[in-house]
């Protein structure tokens, strides 16, 4: 089963993650903080293929995923993108 990691816990990340779970993927919704309430609520609603976590500013942390879409405003993503370039 493919593993998908999603950056962002807002409406876009929630919608994409929920649909991917419906299609049979394992999805981890990530945020900058380990105790993100939106991510926890999303995981509780979407069952065993949904999980949460943080994505530190290191490219090694995303290598275990098949795909990692970004669902955050561009200004928040720029620093991470520069570090992996």
Image (spheres, rainbow, N blue to C red):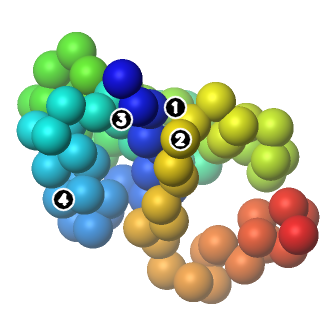
Distance Cα–Cα, label 2 vs label 3: 10 Å
For the residue carrying disc 1, how many other residues have a C-alpha within 10 Å: few (<14), some (14-19), or many (20+)? some
Distance Cα–Cα, label 1 vs label 3: 11 Å
Q: Residue at x 27, y 68 (%)?
A: 12
Name the mark on residue 66: 2
Q: Earlier in the sequence, mark 2 or mark 3?
A: 3
Q: Residue at x 85, y 61 (%)?
A: 84
Q: Are marks 1 and 2 in contact (CB under 8 Å)?
A: no
Task: Report which residue position mark 4 lands on.
Answer: 15
Question: Looking at the rendering, which quadrant does residue 20 occupy?
Answer: top left
Q: Judge from the rendering whether residue 77 lies leftward or rightward of residue 43; answer left or right.
A: right
Could you tell me residue 77's position as x and y percent? 64, 72
Q: Quadrant of the N terminus?
A: top left
Task: Report which residue position mark 3 lands on.
Answer: 27
Q: Are marks 3 and 4 in contact (CB under 8 Å)?
A: no
Query: Foreground: 35 or 1?
Result: 1
Distance Cα–Cα, label 4 vs label 2: 19 Å
For the residue carrying disc 4, how many other residues have a C-alpha within 10 Å: few (<14), some (14-19), or many (20+)? few
Query: Foreground: 64 or 83?
Result: 64
For the residue carrying disc 3, how many other residues have a C-alpha within 10 Å: few (<14), some (14-19), or many (20+)? many
Name the mark on residue 53: 1
């Amino acid at each position: 089963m493919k593993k998908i990691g999603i950056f962002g816990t807002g409406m876009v990340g929630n919608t994409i993650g929920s649909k991917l779970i419906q299609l049979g993927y394992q999805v981890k919704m990530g945020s900058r903080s380990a105790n993100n309430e939106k991510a926890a609520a999303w995981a509780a609603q979407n069952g065993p293929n949904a999980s949460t976590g943080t994505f530190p500013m290191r490219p090694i942390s995303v290598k275990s995923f098949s795909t990692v879409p970004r669902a955050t405003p561009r200004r928040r993503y720029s620093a991470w993108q520069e570090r992996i370039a």
